[in-house]
Image (cartoon, rainbow, N blue to C red):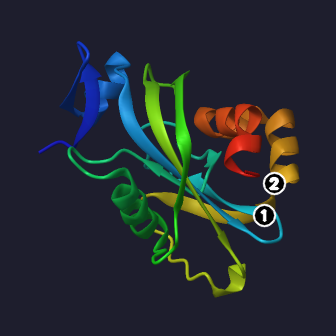
Amino acid sequence: MTEKIPAWINGKLQPVDKLEVHKKGFQHKAISVLVLNKNQEILLQKRSMNKYHTPGLWTNTCCSHPKWNENSKVCANRRLFEELGISKLNLEFKEVIKYRANVGNNLVENEVVDIFTTIISDKKNLKININPLEVMEIKWLNIKKTLEEINTFPQLFTPWFVIYLTQYADRILFK
């Protein structure tokens, strides 16, 4: 059985196969999580080469699509655990961002994204257990340095992460 995610078809939210959503560019629900620390660093992940789009690119801490009828915050916590083994964070909803981006292989992300953030006090106390099917690598990077790298080498990052940091950083990271 293929995974069904919430997508708008003819103005109505419906469960649609995830790959079909990306092939046809249907607008759909998504979540993104940004884990920050008090030193103004963000936890980035490099997407696994197993991903069917944007493999090997750096992105925000976690991103995904809620299952049909799944609450966005529940999805955010579930995917943090499934991708990085991270649990029990106090995620704060920031805002909804809509964007459309070509993600290669004739696939399109046309997302309505619930953005969640959290600020942890000490990154050394954050237990991380990378799922290699989802994530190749992680790193903590200063937010300003991340913005500099995105401006210099945008091709190393997922399109949505570039959009988040170049268009919304003040609202989602510093608010």
Location of mark 1 (residue)? 41
Side of 113 where 4 appears, left or right? left
Cα–Cα gap, marks 2 and 1: 5 Å
Q: What label does residue 143 carry, if any?
A: 2
Vertical order, 3 against 116 (above or below): above
- Which residue is drawn at the image coordinates 78% and 63% (left, top)? 41
Q: Earlier in the sequence, mark 2 or mark 1?
A: 1
How many numbered discs, if any?
Answer: 2
Looking at the image, can residue 132 be seen? Answer: no
Looking at the rendered structure, the kind of residue marked 2 is Ile
Task: Kindly indicate the quadrant of the structure image that contains residue 17.
Answer: top left
Q: Is residue 128 visible?
A: yes
Quarter occupied by residue 13: top left
Which residue is drawn at the image coordinates 17% and 42% (left, top)?
2
Asked whether the residues under the numbered discs 2 and 1 touch, taking CB atoms below 8 Å apart as contact, a structural biologist would say yes
Q: Residue at x 46, y 64 (%)?
A: 80
Q: Position of residue 52 (x, y in %)?
A: 41, 39
Dot 2 crowding, Cα within 10 Å, few <14, some 14–19, many 20+ = some
Rendered view: 81 above or below 32: below
* Residue farthest toward the front in the current orientation of the protein: 175
Residue 25 in the figure: left or right of residue 59: left
Residue 146 position (above or below residue 121): above
Decide: is 29 above or below 80: above
Quarter holding the N terminus? top left
Say what secondary structure mark 1 lies in.
strand
Q: Which amino acid type corresponds to the residue marked 1 in the rendered image?
A: Glu
